[in-house]
Image (tube, rainbow, N blue to C red):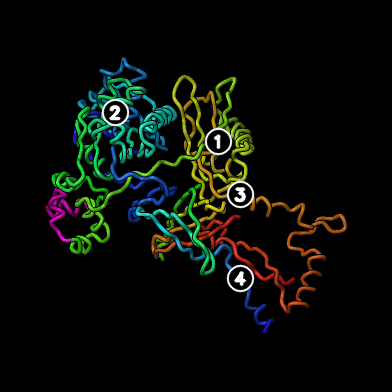
Amino acid sequence: MPSLIFGLSSGPVCFTNLCGLLMLSTRTRPNPSLPPQTPSTVPGQSSRTALCIWLPTFELRLELMRFPALDATSVALLGTGVGTRLTVWQVSERAAEAGVRPGQLVSQAISLCPTLTLLESDPAHYDAAQDTLLEVLAELTPVVEPAGHGRIFLGMDGLARLYGSPHNQVLRVLRSLSRVLPAALVAATRAGLAPGKFGAWVAAAGAQPGDPTIVPEGTLRTFLASRPVSVLPVEGATLDRLERLGVRTLGELVRFPAPALVGQFGEEGGRARAWATGERIDAVRPWYRPRPVRVDLDFAVPVGQLETLNGALDQLLERALARPERYGRSVTALRVIGRLEGSGSWVVDAVLRDPNASKEALAFTLRSRIVLSPPPRAVETLTVELARFGPPSSQTVLFDRKDSAGRVEHGRDLAEGTVPHSLRNAVRELKLRLGHSPLYRVVEVDPLSRVPERRHALMSFDP
Amino acid sequence: MRETRSQKTLLKPLGSPRNARVVEDATGAPVAVTVGKRGAHAKRVMTVRERWRIDDEWWRHPLSREYLAIVLEDGRSLTLYLDLVQGGWWVQGEES
């Protein structure tokens, strides 16, 4: 996720890409060519007052917790992307001073800073740390919504009677982080409290570490007025045009009437104005995370060969699909996690186009991803996690059962497409009685279509 | 007449969405759903089991749906979607 790459301290923070992530939690990956998604609509308790907790360069800070000796040196965390050209993901303050920037090739970074220490990323460790944070914060408020590693929105409605003033509420949250994070990391955490997620994020991004920004209800518009337009979660082209037109702050933006902005920028212009004026408030919504089904396998000897890993993958999928908590549910997303020899981890995520519960289909998808992104070193422990579930899968299984479909005649299997004699007689009798055949055959029209009603159709069955 | 009907009924889409009447809360989340004939009673939404979104055919007729797999107060599971282009709620799957 290169858009989340920032230096630890130097340089201005670019708000745009992070704000783009405010549109959260849909299964499909956001497509930059599509308009921003509408807020998700999940029933349940949502909260208008939002607290944004943000720990910049979360992953690099976690690595420095593991290797404290590197704290005062030039360190860069390598990216996890697919491809052979390694790039820098996050950089420490010293590395940034030497000119190392996120997104640079490793060769460029080393030429700029020969003493640079490179660290491989450990996605499983970051996920675990994020989960721990979420668990701790969920003890304070039931409305917790993660927005990427190191950035979490909390719903704060109704907490005044428990924790007191907004300032005390924020301090209480920051204190609770001390249970799982060292003091240095808690001190580096930025916090912003405001109505809606947009306001809270802008407040947190502009806050100094350890000094939370609190925007009281009714002052959001005034608070936002001095902020740059780059904080808006809109397309980069829109921001470029706004800046070319001399519109630099949100206060300057709201001087334009809504029809003029919509005329220039389409719906996005209207949305931008609604955010800038504080009219649009995105409530914090409770995070829904289905409990994953997880199975793992320890190798006696670390395994580096893909063939062996694929065999282990088949075993793990079989075990995961056989788990009682999976019964009756199809899988829509799954993940393979490998604990690497020495240290570090390797993660492959797969989101299925259609829900599926077939071991072969799931294995095929995972293998395709693993070929593109193989483990960098031998794997000590392999874990398969069924992360998300779809509609029940029992119907598919029923239709796949040919043995009970009467397709055996005189002890022989009927050829594909042959209609059993008994069925032909039944249809003939029904036609005599009703005048037409009331039976239909299910035919595939576009089985891979994402639109359910286009996948299959009923065709008159009149053999 | 019957023969004509038989000949014309060649292909019927399977799983066509049906219109649903949905009561939403202030945030647009469904809190009660009525499916079926006029006069049917609205049922409260007890939980959302899963949700996902599809966006397709942006090059032709944009199609954008937010799906919700919900459980009603009578125990029925429904798959609902909100048409994000045309508006309106639709039911596209039901289990008793």
Check the image and report above or below for A9 versus B20. above
Which part of the image, by quadrant, shows the N terminus of chain A? top left
Coordinates of residue A190 in the picture (x, y in percent): 25, 32
Q: Is residue B11 left or right of residue A34?
A: right
To which chain does the residue with label 2 belong? A
Q: Which mark is residue A172?
A: 2
> Is residue A243 in the magenta section?
yes
Determine crowd level at label 1: few under 14, some 14-19, many 20+ residues with C-alpha closer than 10 A.
some
Task: Report the residue marked by disc 4.
Answer: B11
Report, in whole angstroms, how far the alpha carbon at label 2 lies from the one at label 3: 45 Å
- Looking at the rendering, the stretch of residues picked out in magenta corresponds to A239-257
Earlier sequence position, callout 1 versus callout 3 = 1
Q: Are the residues under badges 3 and 4 in a single subunit?
A: no
Report, in whole angstroms, how far the alpha carbon at label 1 lies from the one at label 3: 16 Å
Q: Are marks 2 and 4 in contact (CB under 8 Å)?
A: no
Q: Secondary structure at mark 1?
A: strand
> Which residue lies at the image location 21% right of the left edge and 50% below the top edge?
A278
Q: Which tag is nearer the camera, tag 2 or tag 3?
A: 2
Coordinates of residue A342 in the picture (x, y in percent): 47, 19
Q: Which tag is nearer the camera, tag 2 or tag 1?
A: 2
Three-letter amino acid code of the residue under disc 4: Leu
Q: Secondary structure at mark 4?
A: strand
> Which residue lies at the image location 82% right of the left edge and 56% below the top edge?
A408
